[in-house]
Image: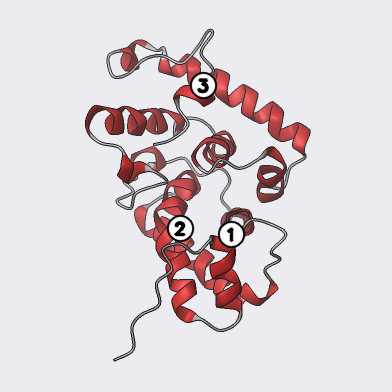
Amino acid sequence: MDKMPSFADASDEGLAARAAAGSRAAFEELVNRYTGRLFHFLKLRSASREDLEDLVQETFLKAYRNISRYDAKWKFATWLYTMAVRLAISRHRAAGTGRVRTGAEDLECSSPGPQETLLRGEEAQRQKNIWNVAGTLSPSAYEALWLRYAEDMPVKDIARAMGKTQVGIRALLYRSRMKLAKRLKAPEHQGQFEAAAGAVPVERKYSVL
């Protein structure tokens, strides 16, 4: 009986190349790696759990259909998130809706995000709480923070994924960090975790879930 290929040490870009060459198993590994991350990333673009699941599934379906067009000069994550943002915007334009917020903050994402499975106990809960507060920001602010600090994307890749200029992304990240720090200091959150402000940069304390 043939063994299933092991992709544990394969890069996302390497898997994408294999998928483009016809390896369905390689693409399935990419789906496993990114499902939870896309759920977290897109939650403010979705009004319900069902809508969120549909959007994630549609993103992977489009990625599968277009994997042969993937350009390895970009990180696979950048390519995938660019597709996800465009699909989310197109879906809500077609539906005649604007910014989706109703109930979005309460969506539970059961799949773990980057490095979440490495954290335990109070630290894991603290990081989760921080991202929950970030979820009260605008969708674009949340998404920029997610790509920068959860995905560790450089500004140029975030700009490509979100369809903005690098200057615009830097300004968005600055405003978003300031708003997040302010909300973390609000009375309703002070008892849950430390505030992010002053001399301690937000990106150093709150970079992962």
Q: Say which of 20 and 183 sits in front.
A: 20
Above or below, comparing residue 100 to residue 71 in the picture: above
For label 3, count other residues whose C-alpha is less than 10 Å away and answer few (under 14), some (14-19) or many (20+).
some
Residue 112: percent from the left, percent from the top?
A: 34, 49
**Left or right: residue 16 compared with residue 118:** right
- Residue drawn at 45 percent across, 18 percent down: 183
Q: Considering the image in quadrants, where does the C terminus appear?
A: top left
Q: Which residue is labeled 3 in the image?
A: 202
For marks 1 and 3 on the same chain, the one whose residue lies earlier in the sequence: 1
Element type at mark 2: helix
On residue 34, the disc is 2
- Residue drawn at 71 percent across, 66 percent down: 71
- Residue type marked 2: Tyr
On residue 208, the disc is none
Q: Are marks 2 and 1 in contact (CB under 8 Å)?
A: yes
- Residue type marked 1: Leu
For marks 2 and 1 on the same chain, the one whose residue lies earlier in the sequence: 2
Q: Considering the image in quadrants, where does the N terminus appear?
A: bottom left
Residue 179: percent from the left, percent from the top?
A: 54, 20
On residue 80, the disc is 1
Residue 39: percent from the left, percent from the top?
A: 42, 52
**Left or right: residue 90 compared with residue 183:** right
- Residue drawn at 69 percent across, 64 percent down: 72
On the image, which quarter does residue 147 sit in? top right
Residue 162: percent from the left, percent from the top?
A: 66, 46
Q: Say which of 49 and 133 sits in front.
A: 133
Q: CA distance from mark 1 to mark 3?
A: 26 Å
Element type at mark 3: helix
For label 1, count other residues whose C-alpha is less than 10 Å away and answer few (under 14), some (14-19) or many (20+).
some
On the image, which quarter does residue 74 sit in? bottom right
